Image: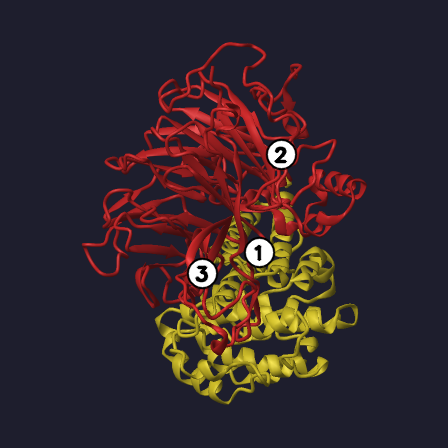
Amino acid sequence: MEFKLEAHRIVSISLGKIYNSRVQRGGIKLHKNLLVSLVLRSARQVYLSDPCPGLYLAGPAGSPGAPPQQSWEPPQQTREPQHRSRSVPLPQASRGRVARSPRPAVTGTGDTLLGGEAEAAEAAWRRVEGPHKPRVPAGGSDLFPEEPRAARRHCCCPPGAPTGAADDEPPAPPPVCPRKRSAAGAGGGPAGCPVPDSTPLKKPRRHLEEQPGGGDEEEEMETGNVANLISIFGSSFSGLLRKKSPGGGLEEEEGEESAPEAAEPGQICCDKPVLRDMSPWSTAIVAF
Amino acid sequence: MLLSLPALHLQTSEHHPLFQLPHGRLGPWCSPTGSPAPLSCETGCGEGSWILVCRLLVPTQVSLLSMEEDIDTRKINNSFLRDHSYATEADIISTVEFNHTGELLATGDKGGRVVIFQREQESKNQVHRRGEYNVYSTFQSHEPEFDYLKSLEIEEKINKIRWLPQQNAAYFLLSTNDKTVKLWKVSERDKRPEGYNLKDEEGRLRDPSTITTLRVPVLRPMDLMVEATPRRVFANAHTYHINSISVNSDYETYMSADDLRINLWNFEITNQSFNIVDIKPANMEELTEVITAAEFHPHHCNTFVYSSSKGTIRLCDMRASALCDRHTKFFEEPEDPSNRSFFSEIISSISDVKFSHSGRYIMTRDYLTVKVWDLNMENRPIETYQVHDYLRSKLCSLYENDCIFDKFECVWNGSDSVIMTGSYNNFFRMFDRNTKRDVTLEASRENSKPRAILKPRKVCVGGKRRKDEISVDSLDFSKKILHTAWHPSENIIAVAATNNLYIFQDKVN
């Protein structure tokens, strides 16, 4: 149990570092953030491997989306059918979807959060999905390339975000990106469309959004790195949340090589009991 | 010009007024113990003793303004500067480098300034002052910049300085911040032309019709002036933060390395560079390691090494292909599974790699150890030295306060027999490769009077603490020695402790 607490603490510290790195002078340092992400991964592995009850999702992974999710559900609706179809051969992967739940949980309890942070957290979470997508094995991958790219074309990115380069990006980057952007647009709705103004929170967020999956063409090193971190971050949470499921161990070993994440959308675990138990984690999310 | 203070010796210097020396530096050489030690490169650190030559402060802007004030105010300001906690962050030294003869010592700081010190010439009447370094030139190398496209501020901190070998009367050095490398020319001017025809003594133009005779201007001596001019600016070639630069032994090219790429430049060409290493993955989520340091072989202009955050070193031959992504040699030591922890990856990340002067060995520094590798053996280092193994149990706290990310450098002495690296609490360590002896010394003003012999320090790990030992828990982790330099041929070392530069010399009888 003490390992779990230690791992928990380390993850919280690591998340804090990642968050701070976004506002530090000189830009995000790739090396340091890579090391922090490695620590995150190690801590997560220990956390998962330590057989200890508590803090986990009570309901099955397949429960439908909770109301709080509705706010940003619509943009993902288009994605859902694909997700479901893909999730069929990969029941474990579906559980990864629950990673999304903390987001609505976060926004649901938005009154306690700063709007900007919620948006950043949401954007961060959406990033989580993104990187996982391409890893869906053969069955799902065919479905990916076309739709997302098309979706990307017409997704509404925050005004001012340098999206010109996005169109030139190869399909390899997570197709979730468009959903991310539109969701960003929609998710930003409650708090207003995320205009790229000069607030510090908005700026890093814009970086997140304009950097779908590494942006080889764009050379956006900071955001690529953050995407990497978020994929681990997200996988860590999804792993924790579906701890009860037998497939928990199958959750990606390598944070970067994330397991297929084509689960049903709307997976949630934002039930109150879980939220209560999860409070340190959600606090960390908020911080992020 | 400086006025002398009663409490502090200040040297008047024509070169530069910003200069302080500790009191009493003109004292005799001999040490309290009186036992001599040979001054020679071949002496290991075990036999010799180290004495403080001088401590140099990189002055803050405060002291610049106070130059004209009266003595009392100056005293206050000087004591203000003494306490390093008041020193501004811009004065923190970020790199130290001797030139190839050891005559000059360059430091770069977080404020983008470069300060060059010059060794005092030996003179008959002041023989004791040989070996001390005085300020020679100061200039602002880099300014803070803003990348508008990415909304990022580019720090002006000087990451590395590398000297070029001297080929004429001027000195050349490369200095780099996160994004831009600059070639600076430092030259002396001690004569000025006088006797112009068209200008009068004050420089005003004369009316040509009033000139009745012509004369040839002559060069007359003037006060020595050292000027630094930027000769080349190598910009816009790096997306990620530059961590190393290295001058090639052909003296025509150099390389600059960032987290994911290494570029090869020609000194004459600033608008092009060749990319020779690129480890950026197609998908950034697959990123697992970054480049942490790179250096050219001292003699073979086709060979270089670069270290990674995974604790590996790759040696590449530029003759093999244009893009050296496939290494020629790969140095990695298998990890000891018993030492595995959350932070194993962090502490195995190599922070510095240096070729020996002979070119036969490379030395790497990771968080807890220094390792010496033979180029002919790739599967493990030939020597491993524990720098501060007592920190192994404290990694979690060091992770919390970010100290675990500190990038310590390491240096060889001129004969490759001794290696040196820094630690915390202003400690630095020397390891004699031949005698296998090591010593821990401290660079602090409290404990070092000029010419006093440095007393070896010891960290007590557990149990009973002896009188002179320091316990691990009382180490000051804000006082870290990341940058050190060793004179290329003599036993003179420069140690940077925050905003102080300490120069130590092996004691001479």
The spot of residue A123 in percent (x, y) is 60, 72
Question: Which structural element holds mark 2?
Answer: loop
Image quadrant in which the C terminus of chain A is located: bottom right
Q: Determine whether B313 is above or below B256 in the image.
A: above
State the hue of chain A. yellow
State the hue of chain B. red
Disc number lying in front (1 or 3): 3
Seen from the viewer's position, the closer of residues B218 and A210 is: B218
Are the residues under badges 2 and 3 in a single subunit?
A: yes
The spot of residue B310 in percent (x, y) is 41, 47
Residue at which label 1 appears: A243
Seen from the viewer's position, the closer of residues B404 and B421 is: B421
Residue at which label 3 appears: B230
**Residue at mark 1 to residue at mark 2: CA–CA distance:** 64 Å
Residue at which label 2 appears: B21
Q: For mark 3, name the chain.
A: B
Name the residue at the bottom extreme: A154
Q: Residue at x 44, y 87 (%)?
A: A150
From the viewer's perspective, is B498 left or right of A216? Answer: right
Circle 2 crowding by C-alpha within 10 Å: few under 14, some 14–19, many from 20: some
Q: Are marks 1 and 2 in contact (CB under 8 Å)?
A: no
Tell me where residue B298 sits by quadrant. top left
Seen from the viewer's position, the closer of residues A269 and A24 is: A24
Q: Residue at x 18, y 55 (%)?
A: B320
